[in-house]
Image (cartoon, rainbow, N blue to C red):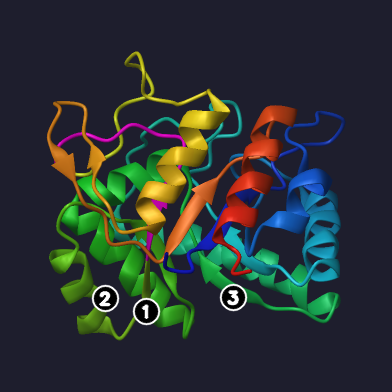
């Protein structure tokens, strides 16, 4: 099995509102996608999350989003390509400042929610995101591994941006390798055994079964897992153990 980096969306609490089991999942992941305040998180939550990641030698990644706190960044919004770049630079810079104050640095970027889905569906927006990464300098971009990664890879190569292709342990896929909409039944796997088996299938380089029944092979560098409840943390622990060489 290939050694996939495990990444997790994290730091998504806000003020007195708590979301996720960050302390419980952090020891089992390689990369922490830290919310930057636009869909979740705030300066204090960002500081605490960075501190926790550094304690466990976990890479800190910026998890920027549309400015949509009420909708948790899951609603598409109309931004120009330049506005997309401004949103990214603002949020990456904020998290990087908090990291630097604690002796760390932002190591990569993974857009969140609707921004992530929109860039995968719209080549103009993906170009804007990659241009933002190139302008900021030397940070890899995490994006969805699909049936064919070649177009995205060509765009990354054009701007000299390293791409980390990501697969999901707990999401259903359509025939092209895009995530099935959360509005549809079966889009999110909740059974821990199903999640673990999908993670292992991806790591072995074996095909998943897409929503239409066709085989789907994903070439991925990193695997997204979630730690928002006790059963999901247990699943992450099992995946970590299975992917760690004896």
Q: Quadrant of the N terminus?
A: bottom left
Most foreground residue, 143 or 35: 143
Q: Is residue 59 magenta?
A: no
Q: Which mark is residue 10?
A: none
**Pointer 1 residue:** 162
In this rendering, the answer to whether 228 lies above or below 35 is above
Q: Is residue 169 magenta?
A: yes
Dot 2: element: helix
Which residue is painted at 21% across and 66% down in the image?
152
In this rendering, the answer to whether 210 lies above or below 219 is above
Which residue is painted at 53% across and 54% down in the image?
64
Callout 2 touching callout 1 (CB < 8 Å): yes
In this rendering, the answer to whether 177 lies above or below 93 is above
Q: Position of residue 95 (x, y in %)?
A: 68, 65
**Pointer 2 residue:** 156
- Lower position in the chain sequence, tag 2 or tag 3: 3
């Amino acid at each position: 099995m290939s050694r996939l980096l495990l990444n997790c969306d994290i730091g998504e609490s806000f003020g007195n509102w708590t979301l996720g089991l960050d302390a419980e999942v952090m020891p089992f992941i390689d990369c922490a996608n830290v919310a930057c305040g636009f869909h979740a998180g705030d300066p204090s939550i960002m500081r605490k999350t960075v501190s926790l990641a550094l304690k466990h030698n976990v890479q800190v990644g910026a998890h920027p989003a549309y400015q949509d706190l009420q909708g948790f960044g899951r609603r598409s919004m109309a931004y120009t390509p330049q506005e997309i770049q401004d949103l990214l630079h603002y949020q990456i810079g904020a998290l990087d400042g908090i990291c630097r104050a604690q002796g760390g640095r932002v190591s990569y970027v993974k857009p969140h929610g609707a921004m992530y889905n929109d860039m995968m569906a719209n080549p103009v927006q993906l170009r804007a995101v990659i241009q933002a990464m190139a302008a900021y300098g030397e940070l890899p971009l995490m994006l969805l591994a699909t049936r064919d990664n070649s177009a995205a890879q060509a765009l990354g190569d054009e701007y000299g941006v390293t791409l980390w292709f990501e697969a999901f342990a707990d999401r259903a896929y359509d025939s092209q390798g895009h995530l099935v909409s959360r509005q549809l039944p079966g889009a999110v796997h909740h059974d821990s055994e199903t999640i673990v088996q999908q993670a292992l299938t991806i790591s072995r380089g074996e095909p998943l079964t897409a929503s239409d029944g066709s085989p789907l092979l994903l070439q991925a560098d990193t695997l997204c897992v979630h730690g928002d409840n006790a059963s999901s943390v247990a699943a992450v622990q099992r995946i970590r153990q299975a992917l760690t060489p004896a």
